[in-house]
Image (cartoon, rainbow, N blue to C red):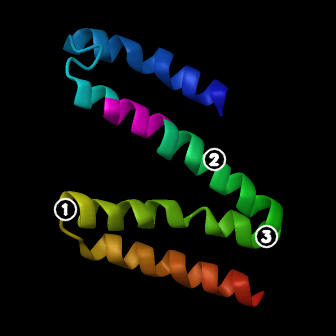
């Protein structure tokens, strides 16, 4: 994960330079950066590692597909974004896939 994060930083660095906003200028910006690092990156990887060790491979791999569906739900709750029909259909298909994997089908 560290390699992927480092590679993403290297690739995105020129875009940040071009935009002229390299670092947060307010304290709240640093709070968001710290929150992203701790909760999203580290916390997410800990949860994934915990689940992969305790679930069978089929269920854990299908279960990882719930991440985009949860991102849509969080965007709706936290940011007030509208839910679209394709998003709801996709979330339903993901949940159906998890259900079928859990049932062993």
Quadrant (top left/top right/bottom left/bottom right) for the C terminus: bottom right
The one of 40 and 67 positioned closer to us in this rendering: 40
Whether pointer 1 and pointer 2 mark residues with C-beta atoms closer than 8 Å, the reply is no
Residue at the spot 61% in from the left edge and 62% down from the top edge? 64
Residue 15: give x, y in percent of width and height.
31, 17
Residue marked by disc 1: 81
Q: Is residue 97 left or right of residue 59?
A: left
Label 3: which secondary element: loop
Q: Is residue 103 magenta?
A: no
Q: Residue at x 79, y 70 (%)?
A: 55
Please report whichever mark, 3 or 2, sits nearer to the chain's N-terminal start. Answer: 2
Label 3 CA crowd tier, 10 Å (few <14, some 14–19, many 20+): few
What label sits on residue 55 in the rendered view? 3
Labels 1, 2: front one = 2
Secondary structure, mark 2, is: helix
Q: Is residue 54 above or below residue 11?
A: below
* Distance of label 1 from label 2 (alpha carbons): 26 Å
In what element is the residue under mark 1?
A: loop
The magenta span reads: 31-37
Based on the picture, tell me whether residue 35 belongs to the magenta stretch. yes
Q: Earlier in the sequence, mark 1 or mark 2?
A: 2
Give the main secondary structure, helix, strand or loop, of the magenta stretch.
helix
Q: Which badge, 3 or 1, is on the more N-terminal residue?
A: 3
Distance, label 3 to label 2, CA atoms, is 15 Å
- Can you identify the residue that label 2 sits on? 45
């Amino acid at each position: 994960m560290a390699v992927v994060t480092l590679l993403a930083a290297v690739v995105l660095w020129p875009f940040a330079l071009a935009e002229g906003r390299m670092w947060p200028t307010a304290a709240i910006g640093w709070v968001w950066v710290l929150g992203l690092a701790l909760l999203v990156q580290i916390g997410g990887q800990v949860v994934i590692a915990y689940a992969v060790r305790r679930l069978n491979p089929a269920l854990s791999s299908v279960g990882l597909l719930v991440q985009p569906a949860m991102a849509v739900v969080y965007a709706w709750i936290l940011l007030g974004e509208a839910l679209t029909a394709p998003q709801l259909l996709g979330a339903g298909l993901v949940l159906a896939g998890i259900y079928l994997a859990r049932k062993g089908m």
